Image (cartoon, rainbow, N blue to C red):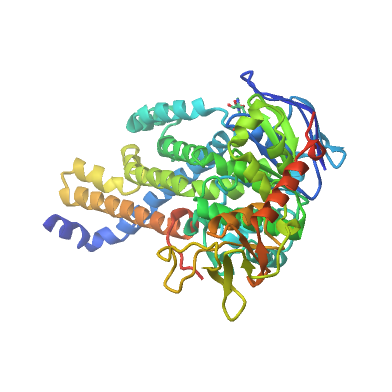
Amino acid sequence: MITFEGVTKRYGDGTVAVDNLSLQVPTGAITVFVGPSGCGKTTSLRMINRMIDATEGRILLDDKDIRQIDPPTLRRGIGYVIQQAGLFPHRKIVDNVATVPYLLGWDKKKARARAMELLERVGLDTKLAGRYPFQLSGGQQQRVGVARALAADPPVLLMDEPFSAVDPVVRTSLQDELLRLQSELHKTIVFVTHDIDEAIKLGDTVAVLRVGGHLAQIADPSTLLAEPADDFVEGFLGKDRGIRRLSFVPAGGVAVRAERDVPGWSVVLDGDDRPLGWRAGGSTGPTDTQAAGKDGLLPFGTFDLEKDSLRAALDAALLAPSGCAIAVDGDGRFAGVVTREALDEALLRASGAAGPTGAGSHG
Amino acid sequence: MNWLIDFFGNPANWSGPGGIPARLLEHVEFSLVALILSMIIAIPLGLLIGHTGRGAVLVVVTANAARALPTLGLVVLIVLLVGVGTTWPVLIPLVALAIPPILVNTYEGIRGVDEDLRDAAYGMGLRGGQVLMKVLVPVALPLILLGLRVAAIQVVATATVAAYVGLGGLGRYIIDGLATKDFPSTIGGAVLVAVLALIVQLAFSLLQRVMVSPGVSRRAAKAR
Ligand SMILES: Nc1ncnc2c1ncn2[C@@H]1O[C@H](COP(=O)(O)OP(=O)(O)O)[C@@H](O)[C@H]1O
Ligand SMILES: [Mg+2]
């Protein structure tokens, strides 16, 4: 656990970048610092590994005041990933990853073996190990940056807008990769971003900062979306909070009818039980055959009953002319249909859950 | 052309204390000693100032002052001070000539390393000295070598002044040739100096290839 106790940072020119910040970063989870540019996110993060020293207050790392630890020693025990990756251009990828193990005096063979293992872990081809940073794409460099931060297996990882400089497609895959890694490694991660969607996607806890380094709210993403503490947080969260919050409600609770027919429509499956589409049928079905494909099937949406959220279920329903969502299992096989009534019930329950009981916000 | 044949074709020019091999050796010796002395002074200074950011003014002042120094004037001045018979009257001006390019390029090379890279190095837990030696120097090496090359070529070309104060080196052919109107000798000497400068240039290109990481020079190393 990392604890900020009344931490203030005043720069030489008088700028107060962080003002009396108190919060706790729980062990083994991702805590995101999010807020507009210049609000003090980077400053807060860099005070943890003493790249910047606090002017007032204390930061505790597992109950130990970090000022008692000599900065290079402290930093070798904390992974650090920055936006531009900051790889050493003169070193091969494998040696970049092994930087901290080398510093810690591991023998070269062991350090390199560890580096190779990590390259695989972050989803990189180990053939890249012998290349130099300039021969890698931005996304690949960022993965190397993550591998390097993890090389000595530090319990804490600090990430400062690590995915901001790559294109949206690569960014999404890097985010997914981080979540996958975290599900295996359970590091204590502090992640800085100005992108609220990224914060909500990655954070177990999200700390929203406002300019001047004031903590506006700290909560889990679902609570944040349901109950923004003030107008600033609400404005920063942006539109569609209700819909976005549904991403955190598992679809598993929705009532599924294990049959292919609903009034006026039925689901057509292939030989493997995978949905092919909706076929109009019965007295209430539309007669417009133009909209139908050449085999008479109409579009459909599916959601994974075990993994997806209520948002995905709702989306699946909106995609189909029948207004019903098709539930599938982990292999994409038909599991049943969810009617509008069933969705309605689940949505009602979800908004109930967003009530006062869901509060976890910081005072 | 005939003059060159006269000079290089004369067997007398190839042996003895006044022969080409001996003069060449003297010339290389002055140049090498001067270059090494200036490296010993300018490289650590450039690294230190570049790394700490303190004393940058010193770089600018030294560079400008030294550039304005008339080399020949300095030679004469030092002869007046220490007398003939030692090599100092030649070495000191050559060192003064070589320091600015080495100092300025070393300083600029270290200063110019991307701030994010420096930051990442500290963030990984490298100590100040490690950041300098393991990251900044390898990345700044092309510029540092460039400074050395410029200095070396200037020194080789200027070491001819040794002849003015009765010392050896290739300058003898030029100075003595002028004095005795022996033009083949003057031209031959000039050609030898030019060839030596060319060799220095080549040597540094080679050094660059060997010392600078392909990751820095961006020579496309073959992916394995
Ligand atoms: N070295 C510095 N000296 C003076 N002011 C700084 C320095 N670094 C950051 N600041 C100021 O502190 C505030 C917070 O900066 P920063 O922590 O980088 O914000 P963020 O990462 O949220 O964009 C900004 O107003 C910024 O201009
Ligand atoms: Mg920042």
Task: Count how many numbered circles sit on residues in the image.
Answer: 0
Residue A282: x and y in percent read 56, 68
User: A9 above or below A338?
Assistant: above
Horizontal side of A224 relative to B196 (left or right) equals right
User: A54 above or below A219?
Assistant: above
Ligand 1 rendered quadrant:
top right
Residue A323: x and y in percent read 58, 57
Q: Quadrant of residue B206?
A: bottom left
Of B149 and B18, the residue lying toward us: B149
Horizontal side of A176 relative to B168 (left or right) equals right
Considering every residue shown, the one lying at the far bottom of the view is A271
Rendered-image quadrant of the N terminus of chain B: bottom left
Residue A130: x and y in percent read 55, 66
Q: Quadrant of residue B70?
A: top left
Q: Residue at x 76, y 42 (%)?
A: A352
Q: Residue at x 69, y 67 (%)?
A: A113
Q: Is residue B121 visible?
A: no
Considering every residue shown, the one lying at the far front of the view is A283
Residue A208: x and y in percent read 68, 34
Q: Is residue B150 visible?
A: yes
User: A15 above or below A275?
Assistant: above
Of A122 and A313, the residue lying toward us: A313
Q: Residue at x 57, y 78 (%)?
A: A270
Of A266 and B157, the residue lying toward us: A266
